[in-house]
Image: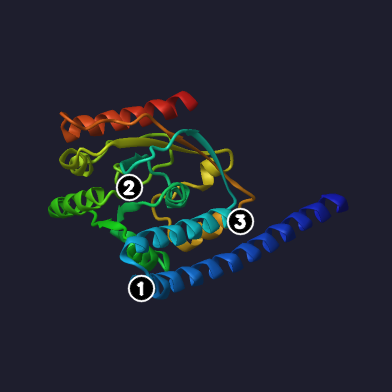
Amino acid sequence: MPQASRELARRKVMKLRLRLCYKITLIVLLFISGLIIAAIIFPALGVLSKPSKVKARRDALTLAWLTWFSWILSLHIIIKGKLLNQPALLVSNHISWVDIIVLGQFAPAHFVAKSDILAWPVIGYLAKQGGTVFVRRGDKQQAKAIAEEMIWLLKQNSTVIAFPEGTTTKGGVVLPFHASLFQATLLTKAIVQPVAIQYLRAATNYAPFIGEDTFVPHLLKMLAMDKIEVSVTFLPTIATVGKNRQSVSNEARAMILNNLTRKQ
């Protein structure tokens, strides 16, 4: 290899290492701030603020934290369609833990996520304190409890975000949805809005969080990227009145699948 080429390669490696070190420092600060917010500021708000203002202030802090996370990851989000401006159940295809950062910054919301997240460093604690509804994999008896919790949230005019596939994929397919997650919308007559997520260019191969992937190594891989490009399409809403949960589930999945198929 010519000397000039070796020098160029060395500079690229050095630039990558410096960027990664910088982003790791920011992530550490982000996680520390998240712990302070969840363990100290949130409880303090409950004591010092008027009950009517607690939720709005917690939501504002959460959105700011997620926006900071998005900036550190260098997320470049291409938005299509329009997010419904009222409480609803948002359902999306699922590719990566990054999906949560992508969707979470658009509106205050409670996520429905696998209980595996509880074991993740820092993130597990923050998700629990942030009101995430956790689903234990393979626990069919839990479905009723999850539905009741989602019903309560929807009745409190909260937005709920769920990934009905129940697991992540590489993004090329949309697995069958778990229809039980739609039961709460039937009982509350809540609107369902499907959302299609697709990672673009280099992120197509690097963003998927599947198989034996673990959080910290995957996070470092995401931080090493110059930017993470992702398309988010808010699809037309689905009314649930007069329908059953399987039909709503099938309709939402078909809309997401059709949208992703047209892009390929």
Residue 25 visible from this viewpoint? yes
Q: Quadrant of residue 187?
A: top left
- Find residue 159 and name its label: 2
Q: Residues within 10 Å of mark 3 (few under 14, many from 20)?
A: some
The amino acid type of the residue labelled 3 equals Ala
Percent across and percent down for residue 190 are 24, 39
Q: CA distance from mark 2 to mark 1?
A: 22 Å
Q: CA distance from mark 3 to mark 1?
A: 35 Å
- Identity, as a three-letter code, of the amino acid under mark 2: Thr
* Relative depth, front residue between 83 and 157: 157
Residue 264 makes an appearance in the image: no
Which percent across, then down, holds residue 192? 29, 36
Report the residue at 44% width, 70% height from top. Answer: 37
Q: Kindly identify the amino acid type of the residue bearing the numbered disc 1.
A: Pro
Closer to the camera, 122 or 205?
Answer: 122
Task: Name the residue nearer the viewer: 253 or 156.
Answer: 156
